[in-house]
Amino acid sequence: MTASVAAPRARAGSEPSRPPLPLWAAVVAAAGAGGLMNLAFPSPSVWIATVPGVALLLFALMGRRIRSALLVGFVYGAVFFLILVSWTARYLGPIPWLALALLEGLLTAVALIPVTLAYRWIPRVIRPGFVRSLMLSLVVAALWVGRELFLGNWPYGGFPWARIAYTLSNTGAARVSSWIGISGLGFVLVLLIALLVELARSGRPLRVGGLVLPAALAALLVFLPAFPTAAHGTMRIGAVQGNGPTGYFDQRAPLSVLNAQTSATESLYGKRMDLLVWPEGGLDGDPFQDPALADGLDEVAANVRAPILANAATQKGEAYFNTSFLWPATDHGALTRSDVQTHAKRHPVPFGEYVPDRAFYYALAPDLIGLIGRGYTPGADAPIVRVGQTPVGLAICFDVIYDELIAEGIGGGAQVLVFQTNNADFRGTVENLQQLGIARMRAIETGRTVVNISTVGTSQVIRPDGSTQASLHADRPGALLDDVELRTGATAGVMLGPWIEQVLLWGGLLALCVAGGLARVRRARSGA
């Protein structure tokens, strides 16, 4: 009875979905994929490693049932994130590192289930050939974007740090993001790899027709020029990396952070500039409440004869904010927050700048949670300050990974972007290079010059094409002074990127659901 039912199912379903790899080999392949993907991210930025990395993962997921797919997905996600964010253990030890990496690994496993289902259902409803390969690859690439959006938005605002498009930040392919956004670029890359996987597993001799679409996608990644934005003059910007004691556990004397920043700024005294930029955490406290800090800013502003874009932890009522503010260069007397342009960090880092569900997590790790004595409140003001008539877009530290904040700055007319960050808690790791790669991608995506300034490095001025205009080495004080190009006009990537994301997310899920429904109907008819 069983044999007589099974044979018609195989015929009616076109071909059964069998795993190309046994489970043990799929687990090994998933671990290898996680390791290869790390090679593609800064540093060492071997972007080509994404091709075998994604291909191995897709092969490992094919034909799996839900439980084995969860195992494969978790092994991939855990290996990938354990390596990628190992810098989180630099000062706080293994608990935060393991918690973040294993949580992201678990979420990755769950979010890869739709990819497994696509490889199970679509072959059951579309006959072998180009149409099946194309549809399967399109859906898999769209579901990959959906997985990134899931991890990038949940929980606690998400962690969109490891999007596959960032592996291309040092390549010409990054220009594609200026047309279809960062998620769109990731979709094109995964689509190309998925098509190559289909060619490899078809078992048929390669034909010219089968290579046309992969070749076209590769040509798109290599040759597409950046979306044009309009030059609008220049602004002379100084940026200072003080290399002061700005880490969470650094021992510091009163005003030592201010003194480090001031000392590194002295080489710019008397030189013409329109704006001086200091990094996140470039002050020891709130200059709106500490006269010594306010006096120090006044002195520096007077010596450079330009406003200072600085950052500090500020307090308003009972609330604390991670605040960037434009400190004016003119004589003004005592300033209050209402006297200056400000922007407060939109996405404070969970378990770094605030503790969600504090009572629950305190019960699990009281020593670690107890270190975070105060919680920052998310800001609500626009990520823009005006220097004269020039709008300057802002992002504070990890806010650089959130698309909507960057788009808000461009929508507000930003002609140059300034990213202020404090990497002191991750000295000696690749965290600053990973973040710098994201900043480089933002320059290309938006068609704007980016001034990325850190307390301890690596700090750079990045041109709109992604090339480096000026740079400071990590772990030493220094100052930059450059005429940076201003640009106007929003790229298609900024304007259309969020819509493309939604089309890919819901389109991929809808196609999967339709394929699943048709596969069930066909299975039922075959069984009958």
Image: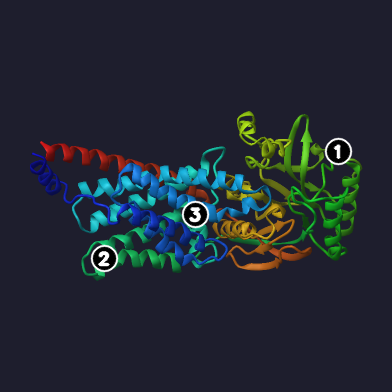
Q: Which residue bears the numbered disc 1?
A: 289
Task: Give the mark nearer the N terminus: 2 vs 1.
Answer: 2
Query: What residue is shown at x 72% (from left), y 39% (from top)?
Result: 371
Q: Which residue bears the numbered disc 3?
A: 80
* Mark 1 element type: loop
Which one is in front, 183 or 54? 54
Q: CA distance from mark 1 to mark 3?
A: 44 Å
Which one is in front, 397 or 33? 33
- Is the residue 427 above or below the residue 286 in the image? below
Q: CA distance from mark 2 to mark 1?
A: 68 Å
- Dots 2, 1 in contact, CB < 8 A: no
| Rendering coords of residue 229 (x, y %) | 57, 59
Task: Give the mark nearer the N terminus: 2 vs 3.
Answer: 3
| Rendering coords of residue 468 (x, y %) | 64, 67
Quadrant assignment, res 515:
top left
Check the picture and name the quadrant holding the N terminus. top left
Q: Is residue 116 left or right of residue 478?
A: left
Query: What residue is shown at x 35% (from left), y 48% (from top)?
Result: 115
Q: Is residue 509 left or right of residue 520?
A: right
Amino acid type assigned to the residue bearing label 2 in the image:
Gly
Quadrant assignment, res 243:
bottom right
- Dots 2, 3 in contact, CB < 8 A: no
Q: Which residue bears the numbered disc 2?
A: 210
Quadrant assignment, res 408:
top right
Task: Give the mark nearer the N terminus: 1 vs 3.
Answer: 3
| Rendering coords of residue 127 (x, y %) | 18, 52
Neighbor class of circle 2 (other Cα within 10 Å; few <14, some 14-19, many 20+) is: some
**Number of the front mark, 2 or 3:** 3
Amino acid type assigned to the residue bearing label 1 in the image:
Gln
